[in-house]
Image: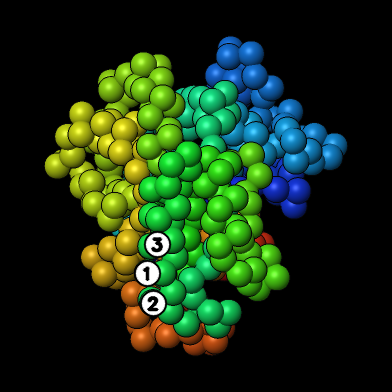
Amino acid sequence: MTTAVVICPGRGTYNASELGYLGRHFPDPALLARFDAQRAAAGQETLSALDGAGRFSMVKHTRGDNASGLIYAASYGDFLAIDRQKIEVVAVTGNSMGWYTALACGGALTPDDGFRVANTMGTLMQSALIGGQLIYPWVDEDWVPRPERKRELLDLIARIGAEPGRELYLSIDLGGMLVIAGDAAGLKAFEKAVEPVQQRFPMRLGNHAAFHTPLQEPVAAQGRMQLPVELFRQPDLPMIDGRGKIWNPGATDRGDLYAYTLGEQVTCAYDFTKALHVAAREFAPDLFVILGPGTTLGGAVAQSLILAQWRGLGSRDEFRARQESDPLLVAMGLTDQRNLAVQGQA
């Protein structure tokens, strides 16, 4: 039996090439119908209609109130599709809003309640749309760590954020990337202060608010008003959160889990890199399975494993060589890799 840690992706993973993902892959029509019913009851367009649209709309499909539900459903559907006869899931984690999906995969929320949490928080984020995000690397193009560069960037973020009239924070520690969030003035100051690198950074993230910063306190408060603690329960699988804390079956206080999920997880930096370090070292899985939709999280997972010096990895070339000979990652958003994980495939 192959052991695996499952990783749930966050925002920005349902794009034009993912249109129709639910139609192609979601394994439980009755469950999808229940998700659609939740959306319809809230006066929102159903996931089936969004996913089945004739063309992808950046304006519509990447909005928080639409993207969160689409991503949650695609990810949870992929989780259901994993062949448990050949893969033993030993723990789950997620990036950013992927934490909500991880709660459902881990059993701390039912599938329907997980959708309720993800859809509610995505809708609240979109309604408020406080601040924005950008992404910037601190490793080189071969993914070799440059820790001194990371320290310089974190110092720069702190200096800009301390200036009057500017808000700027680390949002997500994402492998070899820093996701940075703040208000318009803070983001603009950062963009002016750093040199463009790799022909695309610093890169603004469209339809993203200042997630995982104190600017989201009003959203967190609204979430606690709309989502009761009774939704949460003991997990069935260990869950690794955005601080690297493990929530174990039989030893989880649901009040603490609720307080973290709708408090610190919303308003403080999310350390995805640390979550991966903990996953590798505490569970030593044979595989890391990244749920769909999309394929953009694979680089951050690989970079996090390099930073953890997992199995001697030190660069992108070493990771690629290992992937070709004995894969460490399976990204279910890629057809050839998906076939390594789903039921009925070799």
Instruction: Answer whether labels 2 and 1 touch (C-beta < 8 Å).
Output: yes
Q: Residue at x 63, y 64 (%)?
A: 201
The span from disc 2 to disc 3 (Cα, nearest Å) is 10 Å
The span from disc 1 to disc 3 (Cα, nearest Å) is 5 Å
Q: Residues within 10 Å of mark 2 (few under 14, many from 20)?
A: few
Measured as percent of width and height from the top left, residue 170 is found at: 42, 53
Q: Residue at x 67, y 24 (%)?
A: 46
Q: Residue at x 56, y 66 (%)?
A: 194
Instruction: Answer whether labels 2 and 3 touch (C-beta < 8 Å).
Output: no
Instruction: Answer whether labels 1 and 3 touch (C-beta < 8 Å).
Output: yes
287 up-or-down from 205: above or below = below
Measured as percent of width and height from the top left, residue 281 is found at: 26, 69
**Closest to the observer, 339 or 98:** 98
**Residue carrying label 3:** 154
- Helix, strand or loop for disc 2: helix
Measured as percent of width and height from the top left, residue 9 is found at: 51, 51
- Residue 148 is marked as 2
**Identity of the amino acid at label 1?**
Arg
**Residue carrying label 1:** 151
Q: Residue furthest left?
A: 251
**Identity of the amino acid at label 2?**
Glu
